[in-house]
Amino acid sequence: KDVRSKFWATYSQVAKEHDDEFLERNNSDMDIVLIFSGLFSAINTAFIIAMQPNSTTPLLLQIVQNTSPNNTVSSSIASGANSSNSTWFQGLAYVALSFSLLAAFGAVLGKQW
């Protein structure tokens, strides 16, 4: 064998070892990203569902107010208006959920590549 074929054989072996190590490390990193983003998305979705306005509470209060002999239920309780802070918080929760799902999508694409 000449010097060039020996060089390329050695280069091929070293490159294969380096690539295998790189793929193994990044594959495990993407597994961690998938687990974290899945857990974060599930918890964030639970909070988003809990933040949704409950439309049955004002209706039930109105029924109680209509059926009670003396109108003791105040109308301020029956109003289901959201404050601007809760609207901002809901918006941030939706943005965080979107970024988490985008990270999971990127990790899946990376694993399949």
Image (tube, rainbow, N blue to C red):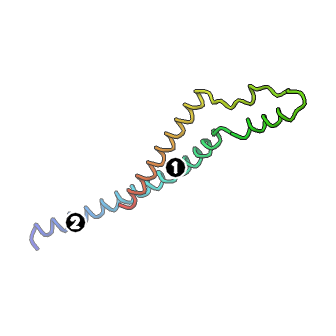
Which residue shows up at 38% across the image and 56% down it? 110
Mark 1 and mark 2 in contact? Answer it, CB < 8 Å: no
Report crowding for label 1: few under 14, some 14 to 19, many 20 or more residues within 10 A (C-alpha). Answer: some
Instruction: Left or right? Give the position of 64 relative to 1.
Output: right
Toward which corner of the image does residue 93 lie, by quadrant? Answer: top right
Comparing labels 1 and 2, the label whose residue is closer to the camera: 1
Instruction: Tell me the kind of residue under disc 1.
Output: Phe
Which residue shows up at 50% across the image and 49% down it? 37
Instruction: Tell me the kind of residue under disc 2.
Output: Ser
**Element type at mark 1:** helix
Which residue shows up at 42% across the image and 54% down it? 107
What percent of the width, then of the height, locates residue 66? 83, 33
What percent of the width, then of the height, locates residue 49? 62, 44
Residue 76: mark in rendering? none
**Element type at mark 2:** helix
Instruction: Left or right? Give the position of 74 relative to 104.
Output: right
Q: For this rendering, which residue is in front, 12 or 3?
A: 12
Q: What residue sits right under mark 1 in the picture?
A: 36
